[in-house]
Amino acid sequence: MAPTVYNYLLTNYMSGTNLSSSSKVHKRSELRSIYNTIIKINKNSPLYKVNLTKENQTFAIGIKDVSLQISDTAKSLYTETPTSVFNSTKAYTEDESSAFVQLVTEDASRYPDPFELKVNSLATNQANKSSNVSANTMSPAPGNYAFTVTLDETTYSFQYNIKENTTNEETLTKLSDFINKSDIGLTCSVLKTKNNMVQMKLESNETGSTGEPIFTLNDTKSPGNATGLIEYYGLNENILNPQNAQFEINGEPKEALSNQILLNKALEIDFISPSQAPARIGYLPDSEAIFSTIETFQSQYNKMVDLANAYDSVQGMSQKLLFKLQKTAAPYRNELESCGITFDECGKMQIDEFLSMQSIESKEINHLFSTNGYLNKVDKQVSSIIINPMDFVDKTLVTYPNFTKPRASNSYVSSIYSGMIFNYYC
């Protein structure tokens, strides 16, 4: 058991961890505070004899591990801190059918002011379609052909060989696959029409017009006096001219080459379809991110309850842990319930998503997650477990401290924790 726990801790806390940025790395002032707390515990603590069974060791390691997780999550939930998830923001639009909006930075100073958006038309790509030819008729003369595709001022050269007795359908299908595999920004397909006729369609992946075609094709070589592939199949015949996206911001007409724009390098907008009327785009608290973090807190809290219940039969002091958790929640029970947070008969936390989301959006939940609310009390509780997980392990009292004499530090019982994970391992 102990080796398993040790390996778990080693994997979770050391593997790939940047210690300089880890929340497990403390400032000097924090370390001094922890040290002073330990000294105070030593002076006021009776002398105990601890029975270090494997169960006791695993239980102590488990509750400290979960306490560290809860403490980290609590710090990300405190509403007053600058890094709190409650400060997270999301963009919204009143017309989700015409545009999708999202923030791409957490720098709120770059967010555009709320505005009205109307999408008049989407940006389109360029499409060419070949002549309509018989699928089973023989293709151009056998031999080596060459042509170029000019796209975004870049010219790509292609060479293609046609074998004897090759039909138009075979040639166009293979030529289409050949261009697609080159991955230059064109998508080709072969369309079979009625009367066993076929056509090749070429579409640019890019959209928008600068006044020039997005792509052009030109023959550069053909066998003998044969007509080149581009001219033979009419692949330069344009059937759809590229168009820019047309939209309005606060009534001011604007254009974009694509259906995605970025405002102030902060707000990304994807046009989906033309809109009937202007729609407001603004910002709201990111309730999904907040709720997700609260769910993480719930999961970690319930791990602690599961540990206490799992070791109840061999570790009587585990009930003390459950009692303290329940006592911490008692004064806030009504507030918790109004925010959709309840506890079942085993002490595990339950969350009603609908009520919880409502309380997040109305900010009713903020007081519970402030530094004066329920979350703070839980954080203080788990912080005491982090300092001294052995307080919840079965042990025998040897002697009380003598308060009539100058205070002397007893052996710090929690120091046993520091080395016990190596027991049965080395």
Image (cartoon, helix red, strand yellow):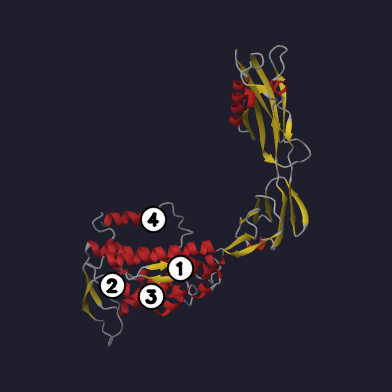
Residue type pointed to by label 3? Thr
Residue type pointed to by label 2? Gln
Q: In this rendering, which labeled residue sits more in front, label 4 or label 1?
A: 1
| Location of residue 63 in the rendering, given as x and y in whole percent from the top left corner | 33, 65
Mark 2 or 4 closer to N-term? 4
Please tell me how crowded label 2 is: few (under 14), some (14-19), or many (20+) other residues with Cα within 10 Å. Answer: some
Look at mark 2 in the image and give the residue it sits on. Answer: 319
- The residues bearing labels 4 and 1 have C-alpha atoms spaced at a distance of 19 Å
| Location of residue 332 in the rendering, given as x and y in whole percent from the top left corner | 43, 78
Look at mark 4 in the image and give the residue it sits on. Answer: 12
Q: In this rendering, which labeled residue sits more in front, label 3 or label 2?
A: 2
Whether tag 3 and tag 2 are in contact, CB under 8 A, the answer is no
Tag shown at residue 74 = 1
Does any portion of residue 25 appear in the rendered image? no
Does any portion of residue 70 appear in the rendered image? yes
Q: Which residue is drawn at 64% across and 24% down?
A: 195
